[in-house]
Image: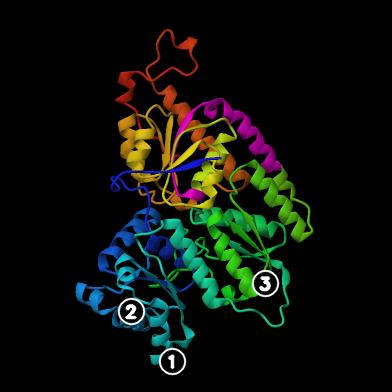
Amino acid sequence: MAQLIKSKKACTVNPLKMSQPIGGALAFMGMRGAMPLLHGSQGCTSFGLVLFVRHFREAIPLQTTAMSEVATVLGGFENVEQAVLNIVEKTKPELIGICSTGVTEVKGDDLKGFVQQIRTRHPELGGVEIVPCATPDFAGAFQDGWAKAVTAMIEEMVVSPEPAIRDPRRINVLPVCHVTPGDIDELRALFEDFGLVPTFLPDLSGSLDGHIPEDFTPTTLGGTGPEEVRAMALAGWTLAIGEQMRGAAEALEARAGVPFRLFQRLTGLAPCDELMAFLSQISGKPVPVRYRRQRGQLVDAMLDAHFHIGGRKLAIGAEPDLLFALVSALGEVGGEVACAVTTTTSAILAQVPCEEVLLGDLEDLEAGAKGADILITHSHGRQASARLHIPHFRIGIPMFDTLGAAHLVTVGYRGTRDLLFAVGNMVMHHHQSHAPGPEDWRDAWPEPSATSHQTVQELVP
């Protein structure tokens, strides 16, 4: 449906995307007792650390191999070995996730080979899971790093059970990178209401949901443990959420024979209906009454929201799977895409319901958003929103100027309903904020006056 257009600019002016190592590190933060380790310079880690601290407003475990110019030229084995030994000695982790960066990938460091050498030289590390993951900065984007880290954990920890005795009540859930801890809590409650026992890989709801721990720990606070990952081989089904998780689901099926069902999005009426039908099928239970009621509320919300979102022009900048979910859900209530910009290539982009998707940056999004009614992207789009005098709906990572980013819910009937209300309210408030005139009654959607532009306030859901 959509044609992918690549920007012809010589360089990125105002970045929309984030790098693969950062996406991989976030995936490892959804594991219990984990310490993500970036194999690169200290600067690579510092940028990621600041980004996550500002977004989640929590202490973030993240270490570096601190590669210098000389170490980069000679090879980084000694740095990786020393970093692993120091982490094990000082933090006692259950899992160390190592993500490569651009500089070490250009040098050609073999992370998998490094880990094998370290295990041979230090058999005392046998109780610690060490998962290497190739995530060069110069290719792909945030969601690619997340997907590679999840796939690497499956390939390192899941083994084929002999004989395979599966528990039909157990399901594996591979969430897309833009799900929040609040989204995972919403999905967990849904699965458990069908009598199913879900294992999320990764599970950010236990580690980055903003709770106060009883004791300090230098590693992640919670999440999925290594023994739970190994037990994923015995589950009845795998649910992959987002096209980016297809590779991880296929890897799990290849290693343990667990069949999978891919849901390209869980935001919107039709995909939620498909999920309910699937859960009812594999659990043998009818859809609980509460979700029938929530479905009715979503249908009513779509009816209400289409009066305010219908015909409005949307400028959206996001990772491919998030872009597909937003364009599809808002398009179902009449929203029109004025500009769609994404970060990396993906098979899902061909299915985005608009004419074209631009592979570009925030400068491209700002240029395409002229004349739009709302700008939808992460917090780095706030200056473009101010210059264009249109409201800015924040979604994705980072959201450093908004409280409660980790608890935003956009999946399921209830999450979709809240998303439509938030976007509809923002558009409604923006058009009501202009100074009223005597002829305004003639037009339900008057254009904001020049003076009102000076007093427009950024509205945050």
Q: Is residue 209 left or right of residue 15?
A: right
Residue 314 shown in magenta? yes
| Vertical placement of residue 309 versus 435, above or below | below
**Residue drawn at (68%, 51%), measured in percent from left and top?**
275
- Which type of secondary structure does the marked residue at label 1 adopt? helix
For mark 1, what is the residue?
123
Instruction: Verify CB contact (< 8 Å) between mark 1 and mark 2.
Output: no
> Which contiguous range is marked in magenta?
293-321
Mark 2 surroundings: few (<14), some (14-19) or many (≥20) residues within 10 A: many
Residue most toward the top?
438
Question: Which image quadrant is residue 43 in?
Answer: bottom left
Q: Residue furthest left?
A: 70
- Residue 249 lies, with reference to residue 108, above or below; the image says above
Q: Is residue 101 in view from this perspective?
A: yes
- Disc 3 residue type (three-letter): Gly
Q: Nearer the viewer, mark 2 or mark 3?
A: 3
Visible residue check, residue 200: no
* Residue drawn at 59 percent across, 40 percent down: 417
Q: Which residue is mark 2?
A: 80
Residue corresponding to mark 3: 257
Q: How far across and down, in percent of the image, does residue 41 sit?
A: 26, 68
**Label 1 crowd bin: few (<14), some (14–19), many (20+), radius 10 Å:** few
Q: Is residue 413 left or right of residue 116?
A: right
